[in-house]
Every structure is written in structure tokens, then in C-alpha cells.
Image (cartoon, rainbow, N blue to C red):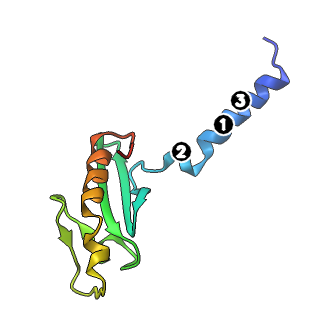
Amino acid sequence: MRITLSSCVLFASIFQVFQSPSIYAGLNQFTEIDSVGKWSIEQKFSHVDNKVECRASMKGYGTWFGERIRLDENGEVLIPQDVIYKNKSDVFSSLIEIRKALSSCRASLLYIRE
């Protein structure tokens, strides 16, 4: 079997792609896949139970998900007691769009915003 320079380059390129951390984005950890206004949409695929999970939260109100203004499993707004926010319209103005984005996210591993 003769190995050419082009086949070595091709193999090295493929190897490099699979070594990239971005290839594992969303695998067993939440990764931001979209944003709507001040809201962030995150998705995670669990290889243990083959399940797609999605969540939405507002940026800027905490360093981790539990500290942020967010939506629960039923699409209702949760505001942690420690969070003080001034502009309620930031929270409620794009809820319909956020709920649609979450629905699209939960429908498939391939996220396509409608």
C-alpha cells in the first residue's frame, strides 16, 4: 500500500477535528446554542439515557444557572429570591419567542430556530 502526502494530510485534518474540544460541545454538558434578547438557550445531550435537555436563562443575573432568572420545565418564569431586577419588560417581553426556541431545541439534537 502506497501512502501519499495528500492522504497523510487528510488523515491529520480528520484527526485534528476529532481532537477539538468543540466536537464534544453539548455532550453531557450544557452548551449555549442560541440567544434571544437577554435570554440564553442551552442544550445538552446525555449519552447515558440518549436524551436531549434544553434550558433558558437570562444572562447577567448570576454566575451559574440556579442563580439566574430562568424558565422551569413548564415554561414558567423563576426568579431567585436574591435577584433584584429593575426592568420587568426585559424578563417578559420575549417569552413567546423563548418558549418556541425551547420547543425547537427539545424536539431534536439538531437545533433549528423557527
Is the residue under label 2 in contact with that under label 3 (CB below 8 Å)?
no
| Percent x, y of residue 2 | 82, 13
Query: How far from the left and from the top, in percent, is residue 83?
Result: 28, 85
**Quadrant of the image for the C terminus?**
top left
Rendered view: 18 above or below 68: above
Q: Is residue 72 toward the left or the right of residue 25 in the image? A: left
Q: Tell me how many marks there are.
A: 3
Q: Which residue is mark 3?
A: 11
User: Which picture quadrant has residue 14?
Assistant: top right
Task: Identify which residue is drawn at 20% across, 69% down.
Answer: 77
Quadrant of the snapshot with the N terminus: top right
Q: Which mark is residue 45?
A: none
Who is closer to the viewer here, 93 or 109?
A: 93
Nearer-N-terminus badge (2/1): 1
Quarter of the image for residue 107 reads top left
Q: Are marks 1 and 3 in contact (CB under 8 Å)?
A: yes
Amino acid at dot 1: Phe
The residue located at (28%, 76%) in the rendering is 89
Q: Amino acid at mark 2?
A: Ile
Report which residue position mark 2 lands on: 23
Q: Nearer the viewer, residue 65 or 79?
A: 79
Mark 3–mark 2 distance (CA, rounded to whole Å): 17 Å
Check disc 1 and report its element: helix, strand or loop.
helix
Mark 2 or 1: the one toward you: 2
- Percent coordinates x, y for residue 108 in the rendering: 32, 39
Q: Residue at 36%, 58% (x, y): give it.
A: 41
The answer to whether residue 17 is left or right of residue 24 is: right
Residue 68 seen by the camera: no
Residue pointed to by mark 1: 15
